[in-house]
Image (cartoon, grey):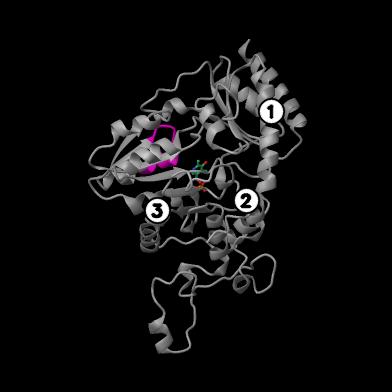
C-alpha cells in the first residue's frame, strides 16, 4: 500500500521498486514470460489461480508489469490496486465492461474522447447497455439523471478537445448515493495533479501512452481501482485476456520516474504559450483549464494541483482552409494524434461532429495543441508565424 506520508515526487522515485522485483538493479528489469515452470505437480496444483504478485502464467504479468502497476497505485491515495492494458482505449473498454450488464444504463459525459463514445454507441449498445450523454458542466445536477437502471457514471475532466472541467466530487457523491459506480478518464491531469480515488472516483483510468510513457514510443493504459471496485476490475481483465507487454510496461516505468519534472515543465511552457495566444486577435478563445474563461476553470482551481501541456484554441473566423494554412506552416508542432511526449503537437479538431447534448458553437475552427519541452519562446514565434498565415488565408 501507498506510503502516503511521503510527497508525490518521492513516491514517483521510490514506488514499485521492491527488492524482490529489482534484484538490486535500480530500474526494475524486463522479465519476459509466457510459461512459468513449477517444481512439481503438487506445486502447480497448489498455486492459486487468482494469484496477485506471484508468477503464474505470462498473461498475469511478471515483476515488470507489477512494478509499474504498484507505482501507479501508490500515486492514488485510497486505491486498492492497478492493472495495465495494451492501450488507453483497452483500459476504458475493460473498466466499462467490468461494471456494466445488459439492461443497464451508463451516463457518459458529452465531451468524452471519441473512441470512448464509439465503444458506447457500438459494442455496448449491441450488448443492450444504453448510454445517456450528459452536459460536462452538470455537476450535482447529475442526480436528476440517475435512474433505477443507471449502473455507472463516466467522467473525463477536462473533456477531450474542449476542456470543460467537471465537478468530479459532486458527481461521485450523487452517484454513490444511488449505488452507481464512477469512472474517470484522468489522462490529462494524471494522479499527480488530480488524485482521483481520493476525490471519490471508483475506477481511475489513464492512457499511459501519454504522460506516463512520455516519449511517444509505446502504447499503454491503466486502471486504478478503489477497494470497492477492485474485484470486478480484476475479474473482467482476466476474463478478457488483457495483458500489457513487459517491454512497454518497462518504458512506462522509465517514463514515470521523470513524469513530475516533465509535467511541471509542460505546465509552465503551456501556460506561457496559452497566455500569449489569449492576446492574439486571430484567437477568439483559449480553452485551457488554468485560464479564466475556460468552462469549469473555478473547479480546476479548487480541485487540481496543476495543469498539463494540452489545450485548445478557437480561431477567430475562417474555416478548414485557413486553419490548415496555419497548421501546415508550423515547424515545431508536429501534426499527429496522441500527446504527452516531450515534443509539441497540433491537430485540427471538430467537436461539433460528435456532441449530442451540448452542441458545439464557436467563432471559428478549433485547433488542439500539445506544448512540449522546447523553449516556449521558440514555440510562440512559430505560432506567431502560423497565425499570420491564418490571417492571410482569411483575406
Ligand atoms: C489518447 C487518449 C485515450 C486513449 O489512449 P490510447 O493509448 O491512445 O488508446 C483515452 N483517453 C484520452 C483522454 C486520451 O487522450
Q: Is residue 70 magenta?
A: no
Circle 3 packing at 10 Å, graded few (<14), some (14-19), many (20+), is: many
Residue on which the image places disc 2? 8
Instruction: Tell me the quarter of the picture where residue 14 sits.
Output: bottom right
Q: Which residues are magenta?
A: 109-119
The circle drawn on residue 94 is 3
Circle 1 packing at 10 Å, graded few (<14), some (14-19), many (20+), is: many
Reply above or below: 255 against 317: below
Whether label 2 lies within 8 Å of ligand 1 gets the answer: no
Percent of width and height locating residue 42: 40, 88
Marks 1 and 2, Cα distance to the nearest angstrom?
Answer: 27 Å
- Name of the residue lying farthest toward the top: 395
Q: Is residue 113 magenta?
A: yes
Q: Earlier in the sequence, mark 3 or mark 1?
A: 3
Instruction: Quarter of the image for the C terminus: give it.
Output: top right
Percent of width and height locating residue 180: 32, 44
Per the image, label 3 sits on a secondary structure element best described as helix
Residue on which the image places disc 1? 273
Q: Earlier in the sequence, mark 2 or mark 3?
A: 2
Amino acid at each position: 500500500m501507498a506510503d502516503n506520508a511521503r510527497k508525490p515526487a518521492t513516491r514517483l522515485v521510490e514506488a514499485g521498486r521492491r527488492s524482490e522485483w529489482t534484484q538490486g538493479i535500480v530500474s526494475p528489469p524486463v522479465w519476459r514470460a509466457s510459461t512459468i515452470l513449477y517444481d512439481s505437480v503438487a506445486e502447480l496444483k497448489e498455486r492459486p489461480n487468482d494469484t496477485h504478485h506471484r508468477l503464474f502464467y505470462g498473461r498475469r504479468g511478471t515483476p515488470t508489469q507489477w512494478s509499474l502497476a504498484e507505482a501507479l497505485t501508490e500515486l492514488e491515495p485510497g486505491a486498492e490496486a492497478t492493472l495495465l492494458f495494451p492501450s488507453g482505449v483497452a483500459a476504458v473498454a475493460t473498466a466499462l465492461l467490468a461494471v456494466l450488464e445488459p439492461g443497464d444504463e451508463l451516463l457518459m459525459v458529452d465531451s468524452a474522447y471519441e473512441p470512448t463514445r464509439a465503444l458506447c454507441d457500438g459494442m455496448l449498445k449491441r450488448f443492450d447497455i444504453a448510454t445517456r450523454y450528459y452536459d460536462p458542466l452538470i455537476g450535482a445536477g447529475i442526480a436528476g439523471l440517475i435512474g433505477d437502471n443507471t449502473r455507472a457514471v463516466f467522467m473525463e475532466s477536462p473533456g477531450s478537445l474542449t476542456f470543460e472541467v467537471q465537478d468530479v466530487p459532486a458527481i461521485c457523491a450523487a452517484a454513490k448515493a444511488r449505488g452507481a459506480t464512477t469512472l474517470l478518464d484522468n489522462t490529462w491531469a494524471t494522479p499527480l495533479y488530480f488524485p482521483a480515488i481520493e476525490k471519490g472516483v471508483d475506477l481511475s483510468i489513464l492512457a499511459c501512452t501519454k504522460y506516463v510513457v512520455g516519449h511517444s514510443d509505446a502504447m499503454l493504459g491503466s486502471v486504478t481501482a478503489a477497494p470497492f471496485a477492485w474485484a470486478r476490475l480484476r475479474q473482467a481483465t482476466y476474463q478478457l485476456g488483457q495483458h500489457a507487454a513487459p517491454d512497454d510496461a518497462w518504458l512506462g516505468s522509465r517514463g514515470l520516474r521523470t513524469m513530475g519534472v516533465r509535467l511541471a515543465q509542460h505546465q509552465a511552457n503551456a501556460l506561457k504559450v496559452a497566455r500569449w495566444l489569449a492576446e492574439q486577435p486571430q484567437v477568439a478563445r483559449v480553452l485551457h483549464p488554468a485560464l479564466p474563461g475556460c468552462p469549469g476553470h473555478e473547479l480546476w482551481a479548487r480541485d487540481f494541483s496543476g495543469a498539463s501541456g494540452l489545450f485548445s484554441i478557437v480561431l477567430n473566423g475562417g474555416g478548414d482552409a485557413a486553419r490548415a494554412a496555419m497548421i501546415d506552416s508550423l515547424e515545431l508542432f508536429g501534426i499527429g494524434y496522441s500527446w504527452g511526449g516531450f515534443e509539441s503537437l497540433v491537430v485540427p479538431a471538430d467537436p461539433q461532429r460528435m456532441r449530442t447534448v451540448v452542441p458545439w458553437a464557436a467563432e471559428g475552427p478549433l485547433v488542439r495543441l500539445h506544448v512540449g519541452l522546447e523553449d516556449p519562446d521558440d514555440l510562440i514565434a512559430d505560432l506567431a508565424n502560423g497565425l499570420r498565415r491564418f490571417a492571410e488565408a482569411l483575406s
